Image: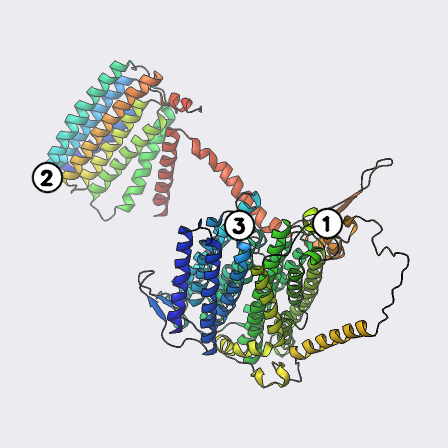
Amino acid sequence: MLNQLAGVGIGLLLALAVGSALLARARHAAALTYGASALICLALAGIALQALGAGGAPGVALELRVGMPLARTQLGFDALSAAFAVIVNLASAIVSVGAIGLGRHVREQQRVLPFYPAFIAGMNVVLLAQDAFSFLIGWEFMSLASWALVVSDDCSDSNRRAGLVYLIMATGGALTLLLAFGVLAGPDGGYAFGQMRQATAFAPAAIVLVLALIGAGSKAGLVPLHAWLPLAHPAAPSHVSALMSGVMTKVAVYGFIRIVFDLSGPPAWWWSIPVLLAAAATALLGVLHALMEQDLKRMLAYSTVENIGIIFIGLGLALTFKANGMAVAAALAIVAAIFHGFNHSLFKSLLFLGSGAVLHATGERDMQRLGGLIHRMPLTALAFLAGCVAISALPPFNGFASEWLTFQAILLSPQLPQWIPRLLVPAVGATLACSAALAAACSVRAFGSTFLGRARSEPAAGAGETDPWSLGAMLVLAALCLLAGVLPGLVIDSLGSVSELVVQGRLAPQSGQPWLGIAPVDAQRGAYNGLLVFVMIASAAAVTALIARRFASHALRRSAAWDCGFPEPSPLAQYTPGGFAQPIRRVFGSVVFRAREQVSMPGPGDTGPARLRVELHDTVWDALYAPVVRAVDATAGYLNALQFLTIRKYLAVVFIALIVLLVIIGTSR
Amino acid sequence: MSPIEADVAHFLAGSLVLVSFLLLYQDRMFALLNTFALHACVLAFSVGWQAWVQGAPHLFITALIALVFKGVVIPVALHRIVVRLGIHGTLESAVSIGPTMLFGMGLVALSVIVMLPVTEAAGAFVREDLSFALSVVLLGLLMMVTRRNAVSQVIGFMSLENGLVLAATGARGMPLVVEISVAFSVLIAFIVIGIFLFRIRERFDTVDVQVLDMSRGESS
């Protein structure tokens, strides 16, 4: 029954896409489309929550008579897809509400509206698919719809380039997934997931691991396949960026879990090594890039890369533990990963909506030109601050809970029998700690330079509070972040059936813990009580405020002005985001970014300013992608001559090809 | 098939290859047309001999088509076109005659090397016939590639087609319909190409295809 309802929901989304394509120029088309998307997503989230509560697939899967020959399209929930469907649809619903406000500002509605519901429908098809064909069709649908959204504003060169890079990477990723399913299907070619679980693969399962890591990793933004992500995510309108960053990456994570944990049989212990290495590199590189970035939305996109790293660290740990039969530890790691995915979908959507609000209020994405917005947009600032606290993994918000769970899993690594993961996992943990600290610095920098201080530019000084729809969406997201952080036990318990399905293990139910706390392994090893921390923080703050108000002296005192770090009245003399990142750039930059600083002093008598020039390189792009681009360019330039041959020369080319083939036949016999 | 019959068939098919070399060697317009007529006649004889040997009367029709159309009608018509256009003169070649001939010999060797192992299942006679036919096809292509003049390219194309007919009759069993349609397509190709020749001539005052390329803004 739930499967059928979910199918109806997807059908409604597709119908909405068609309808809004026809009526995109109508007056309230945007508000209607986003509103309807929000309602459908909310319903889908409710259905998925039901399915998750029931632990998977009550009733039969929804079979459709459409799709590939020899393979019926099967849609249905199991615990894993239900969990991710909750994540995807909940965030999509709230973002859609915000989009009612933010989406009005898009110039050409007909280029955004039809693809928005189609994009959400594609993601839902991926999650519900019970066979490889519908999975891949949904995957491509999601990729192409989001590509269309990325290039919806194709006025700037950078957006067009982002679209091109994204399209290439998405196609490559889908191709590798196709190959992975081909290997999994085995010689009999059973493409339903049920058949795949039983099939004997005709190639080593490690090939599947590599293909899944490339295919799903490129969509999620795993280093070094992340190159498209910081280009494409910010290029889309802000509410779409929220979906792409907050939600679509989770679909990629789902794809990885589905293939590696569910379909490809019992893992070998060394499978986790490439996953952990890539994940640790992703976390660290992502946050370092985010710290160097001046553009608010690009900074958020890089921070998505970092969070994907954290999620994949959890997945890598779960692989190790599962391979060694440590079911509870594996359950802890996978719950931590999915929990962090859920959290990231909330706070990243919140932050992108906030950046969209800032963008529309000021027309600026460059943090260097913002500042002081807390006075003009107080509620946006409050919601954004909540998002920043959550993403920095500070209690009592949700980011802390999931990262704490990940660290609990890391602390179980000494029980592993192999020495390589025993050495590797703590190193990964150190990297994770380092990137968590850097992420905190990153959000301090983002919030500080955007909302605090004084306005650095004219538009920032004249900004006004954003519309009530997006404000409401942001505040709801902030409240959910707080709620998930205060009551993590609820989330952990509801993910029990998922870990049962994926790693055949289950954490002890947390609802029995006193005061709504959590103690995933046992109370001696580690326990956390979000509620207690929240109450403590709240009461301490209240008491301090009370003391300050009640008992402090009310007498006024006039004294000479302390210049407070502002000897110059110009707002340009404030601490800049570039300056804030400089110490970190000096520590990591020379290796990771090949950073170079150059100070050019004006000559004697010259009244011009001294200049500091910073040169940063994207080392991954330079090392991996630039050679490919150059090779393609050179080959294309070389082959271009073939376009302008004479008829006789074309004939000669055919003739020579024929001769060569004949020679090959003649000599090979 | 008695040895003498096979020998005659080989002799005729081999002659066709030889005449293909003659075609490659020609550097004057009328001589080229006459040689092509000879090419078609040899083909007609070869097909006729096959018809006699195999006892396949429909092959006589093929032979007749080859003799009438390719041996008489097309050469005469091309002859008249050439006279009317006033383009009889020496033919320019992109690659000079000597290397072309050497290369052609290489092609014959190649087709023998390729064909003999590939068709092991077939009878000895068919195998050699097929390698002769492939040689004729390759030599026709070689002519199209190495000649600059549009008329020689047309002749090259038609000699290539003769090679196909030879292969088909040797392989016993090409239905008449196919042969007639092939004959018609060649005729239509001839008409189209003839019209093209006139048009090219009208516009460019020459049928040297290099001039056409120059008019596209390129030179080679």
Label 2: which secondary element: loop
In percent of width and height, residue A387 lies at 64, 64
Contact flag, marks 3 and 2 (Cβ < 8 Å):
no
Q: Which mark is residue A456?
A: 1
Classed neighbour count for the residue bearing mark 1: other residues with Cα under 10 Å, few (<14), some (14–19), many (≥20): many
Q: A636 or A501: which is nearer to us?
A: A501
Closer mark to the observer between disc 1 and disc 2:
1
Q: Identify the chain of the residue marked 3, using the numbered disc in the image.
A: A
Label 3: which secondary element: loop
Q: Identify the chain of the residue marked 1, using the numbered disc in the image.
A: A
- Answer above or below: position of B220 versus A512: above
Query: In the figure, is residue B19 to the left or right of A618?
Result: left
Q: Tell me which label, 3 or 1, sits earlier in the chain.
A: 3
How far apart in space, not on screen, are marks 1 and 2 (Cα)? 97 Å
Classed neighbour count for the residue bearing mark 3: other residues with Cα under 10 Å, few (<14), some (14–19), many (≥20): some
Q: Is residue B27 visible?
A: no
Q: Identify the chain of the residue marked 2, using the numbered disc in the image.
A: B
In percent of width and height, residue A1 lies at 37, 74
- Give the amino acid type for the residue marked by disc 3 in the picture: Val
Q: Which residue is mark 3?
A: A106
Asked where in the image residue A651 lies, by quadrant, the reply is top left
Query: In the figure, is residue A234 to the left or right of B219?
Result: right
How far apart in space, not on screen, are marks 3 and 1 (Cα)? 26 Å
Contact flag, marks 3 and 1 (Cβ < 8 Å):
no
Label 1: which secondary element: loop
- Give the amino acid type for the residue marked by disc 2 in the picture: Ala
Q: Which residue is mark 2?
A: B56
- Answer above or below: position of B173 versus A530: above
Q: Residue at x 14, y 26 (%)?
A: B68
Q: Which mark is residue A606?
A: none
- Give the amino acid type for the residue marked by disc 1 in the picture: Arg
Q: Residue at x 23, y 20 (%)?
A: B78
